Image (tube, rainbow, N blue to C red):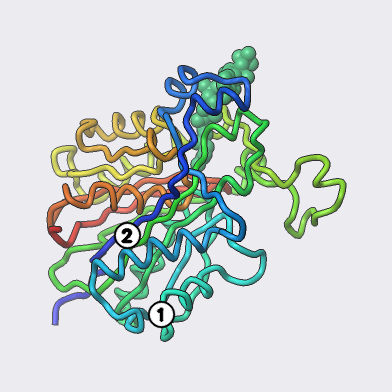
Amino acid sequence: MGKISAAITAVGKYVPDFVLTNKELETMVDTNDEWITTRTGIKERRILKGEGKGTSFMAIKAAEELIQKRGIDPKEIDLVIVGTATPDLQVAATAAFVASQIGATNAFAFDLEAACSSFLYGMSTASSYIESGRYKKVLLIGADKMSSILDYTDRTTCIIFGDGAGAALFEPNEEGLGFQDEYLRSDGIGRNFLKIDAGGSLLPASEETVKNKQHFVFQDGKSVYKYAVSNMADVSAKIMERNNLEEKDVDWLVPHQANKRIIDATASRMGVDSSKVMMNIQKYGNTTSATLPLLLADYEKQLKKGDNLVFAAFGGGFTWGSIYLKWAYNS
Ligand SMILES: CC(C)(COP(=O)(O)OP(=O)(O)OC[C@H]1O[C@@H](n2cnc3c(N)ncnc32)[C@H](O)[C@@H]1OP(=O)(O)O)[C@@H](O)C(=O)NCCC(=O)NCCS
């Protein structure tokens, strides 16, 4: 038996129907389509509407699409990981609810929170469980209802984020495909620049915190931008160097969709042509944990077995990193 690597064998996605355009945002805050487009690359984002619908609603839909595409019995799934910064509830793991709802009754399940790097870190976790031989099917979902933590009177944050979910199944591979290498980093300095102040153990919810709007995302955009640009480019260049990948060897850059300018800077540092850069920020904005699997789902038809993919992400915390993976199937 050859060495076991962890390959992605199927993907699924879900985005809500409601489209919030830049034009509509112009009626809500002091902004304009031209500013948003040139500064971020975003034209529109999806918003999950409807009472009683949380992040799990989208995670379940993405997982169900994946299960149907792969044609597996959900009972075969060993583990469900939900990467999210917006769990349904504070204490009960969203992943446990998702696993039960999709019929993954033999799985255990947990959430993974690393802000915009949740899916990337989850890829590392899922791959480790497969490579060790401990489990055969790990379902990794990235899902966020960012609209639930945004202040739609704050033009510096509400224009950036959107809602969505994506899923990927990790299974053993003996052809050397799948996960190859990772370079993951974090730095606690980041919590000064991108955070929700209240509702956690440091500052529990109170009338005061609600009045002060401390349950919404706060971001010092300029500082986050500075860290994101240099760090995302650094780790991507590093993973190429460590694996002797030249730009011609990289078939796809799969970058977290935070800002088109950050993505362009990363691609340029890697020397990768824009035709090889996955991009859907114009349609969905920054969906936090969902950006990477949404890209895989949108580009799935263009991916070929053996393609070299370099993933890169940067998020709150700060958390960031890069993963090198060989695509394992033709669709
Ligand atoms: C948020 C971000 C798009 C702002 O772009 P920027 O070029 O840094 O813009 P600035 O914050 O310097 O603001 C420039 C001006 O535009 C204004 N502005 C801010 N938001 C605006 C909006 N939505 N519409 C119009 N004007 C806006 C500012 O008030 C500022 O005006 P001033 O010069 O009169 O003070 C950018 O900083 C960014 O993408 N940061 C990283 C975000 C990110 O990646 N977050 C997630 C990490 S995973």
Instruction: Name the residue rendered at 51%, 44% in the picture.
Output: 47
Instruction: Name the residue rendered at 51%, 63% in the picture.
Output: 56
246, 279: nearer the viewer: 279
For marks 1 and 2, give the CA distance: 16 Å
Taking the view exactly as shown, the residue that stands out farthest to the front is 50
* Vertical position of residue 285 compared to residue 146: above or below: above
Ligand 1 placement by image quarter? top right
The quadrant in which the N terminus is found is bottom left
- The total number of labels drawn is 2
| Residue matched to label 1 | 104
Question: Where residue 64 sits: x, y (%)?
Answer: 36, 67
Q: Secondary structure at mark 2?
A: strand
| Residue matched to label 2 | 12
* Vertical position of residue 141 compared to residue 23: above or below: below
Q: Amino acid at mark 2?
A: Gly
Question: Where residue 231 sits: x, y (%)?
Answer: 44, 39
- Give left or right: position of 264 versus 5: right
* Vertical position of residue 57 compared to residue 291: above or below: below
